[in-house]
Image: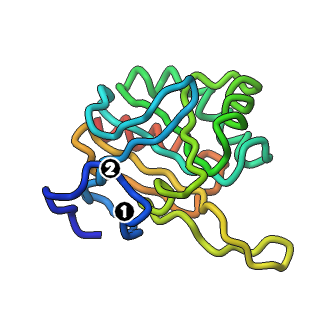
Amino acid sequence: MAESPSAAPAESTADSPASAQVVNAQVQNFTAAMTGDQTFELDGRPAKYTVLYFYPKDNTPGCTTEAIAFREHHDEFTALGVQIVGVSRDSLRSHESFKSKLGLPFDLISDPEELVCNQFDVMKMKNMYGKKVRGVERSTFVIDAHGKVVKEWRSVKVNDHVLEILDFLKNHS
């Protein structure tokens, strides 16, 4: 993706073209509802880096394992000035339950209309039990304080992924 022009709209909208994020690309500002009755806004975050991780569905084995790994290493991310935010198409109600059940110390963005998912180009056709279905491709993006993607992982395998992100951030800080 080419860098967004400075005259780009302030928010992601349903009319915004879907385009893949790539390293060094400027992410268009967006706002989205998240747990804790909060609204996430990319611009103006106090974190040095934001880890935005996209996952298919709350309460599924891989997504639960990934969320627990982020929880277990949350203090290390915080010490590096990193904010962790999970994103899926699940409802806020589902997210609140998932967050509470797992004791997650970070918030989750609800994206049922796929605006954020489309902005990051994570909606893909997948094979589920021999049928083609459209779903979220497990992906992670590290975004700096200026809104620039500094690292991305696509088609993520859960095992050791969180440690890989931590290693990248420790060496990048």
Q: Earlier in the sequence, mark 1 or mark 2?
A: 2
Q: Which residue is mark 1?
A: 21
- Of 131 and 161, the residue lying toward us: 131
- Of 145 and 37, the residue lying toward us: 37
- Residue at the farthest right position: 129
Q: Residue at x 86, y 73 (%)?
A: 129
The three-letter amino acid code for the residue at tag 1 is Gln
Q: Which residue is mark 2?
A: 11
Q: Secondary structure at mark 2?
A: loop
Please indicate whether residue 172 sits to the left or right of residue 54 in the image: left
Vertical comparison of 170 with 142: above or below: above
According to the image, what is the colour scheme of the structure? Answer: rainbow
Q: Residue at x 36, y 47 (%)?
A: 30
- Of 113 and 133, the residue lying toward us: 113
Q: Residues within 10 Å of mark 2 (few under 14, many from 20)?
A: some
Q: Measure the alpha-carbon separation of dots 1 and 2.
A: 16 Å
- The quadrant holding residue 136 is bottom right
The three-letter amino acid code for the residue at tag 2 is Glu
Query: Residue 66 appears at what percent x and percent y?
Result: 66, 42
Looking at the rendered image, the disc whose residue lies closer to the viewer, 1 or 2, is: 2
Vertical comparison of 24 with 40: above or below: below
- Of 74 and 95, the residue lying toward us: 95
Query: Residue 131 appears at what percent x and percent y?
Result: 81, 78
Do labels 1 and 2 touch, CB within 8 Å? no
Q: Residue at x 60, y 62 (%)?
A: 137
